Amino acid sequence: MTFREVAAVRLDEKKSKFYAHLYEIDSVDDVAAIREIHEKLYKKAAHHCYAAAFGTFLDSRADGEVGSPGRVLAEILERHGLSSHVLIVSRLFGGIKLGPAGVARAFREAGNGVVKEYEERRKAL
């Protein structure tokens, strides 16, 4: 199992914190290890939603969160042609409900933000 974190960003939305990380992976098996890391890193997070793409494999999980954030993250990977990556967002609830549309929007913004950070880093090399 080898994976590399290539970008990370934080989004604050109505007191909730969304920590988005993008990883390059060498195997589908890396997904479980990455999720385990995030569960330890963000122990107070209510949800760890992710999308993973490796070749033709595409998987996403909403981890009980409303608004289908796993699907939202998978769409971001597909749109940017990231086919050997895991995009994971951990949400620390801030006490204000966002509703399904607000949650989806926040996960989309966090996911797009980390991909943008990654693309800017790649251009700088």
Image: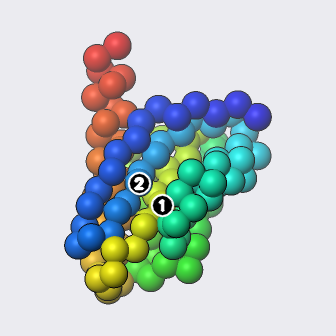
What residue is shown at x 28% (from left), y 77% (from top)? Answer: 102
Q: Quadrant of the N terminus?
A: top right
Seen as rendered, the residue at the extreme top is: 125
Circle 2 crowding by C-alpha within 10 Å: few under 14, some 14–19, many from 20: many
What residue is shown at x 35% (from left), y 62% (from top)? Answer: 17
Establish if 2 lies above or below 47: above
Query: Could you tell me if residue 94 is visible in this image?
Result: yes
Along the horizontal axis of the image, is 33 left or right of 79? right
What residue is shown at x 26% (from left), y 61% (from top)? Answer: 12
What residue is shown at x 36% (from left), y 23% (from top)? Answer: 122
Residue 90 numbered mark, or none: 1
- Give the residue number, with chain letter if any, for mark 2: 19
Of 97 and 85, nearer the camera is: 97
Provide residue 116's location: percent of width, then percent of height. Answer: 29, 40
Establish if 97 lies above or below 122: below
Provide residue 47's location: percent of width, then percent of height. Answer: 52, 70
Provide residue 81's location: percent of width, then percent of height. Answer: 44, 42
Query: Could you tell me if residue 74 is visible in this image?
Result: no
Establish if 32 lies above or below 107: above
- Marks counted in the figure total 2
| Amino acid type, callout 1 | Ser
Q: Which callout, 1 or 2, points at the residue further toward the start of the chain? A: 2
CA gap, disc 1 and disc 2: 5 Å
| Amino acid type, callout 2 | Tyr
Q: Quadrant of the C terminus?
A: top left
Circle 1 crowding by C-alpha within 10 Å: few under 14, some 14–19, many from 20: many
Provide residue 60's location: percent of width, then percent of height. Answer: 58, 63
Q: Secondary structure at mark 1?
A: strand
Q: Secondary structure at mark 2?
A: strand
Residue 54 numbered mark, or none: none
Along the horizontal axis of the image, is 9 left or right of 46? left
Tell me, yes or no, whether the two marked residues, 1 and 2, touch with CB atoms within 8 Å.
yes
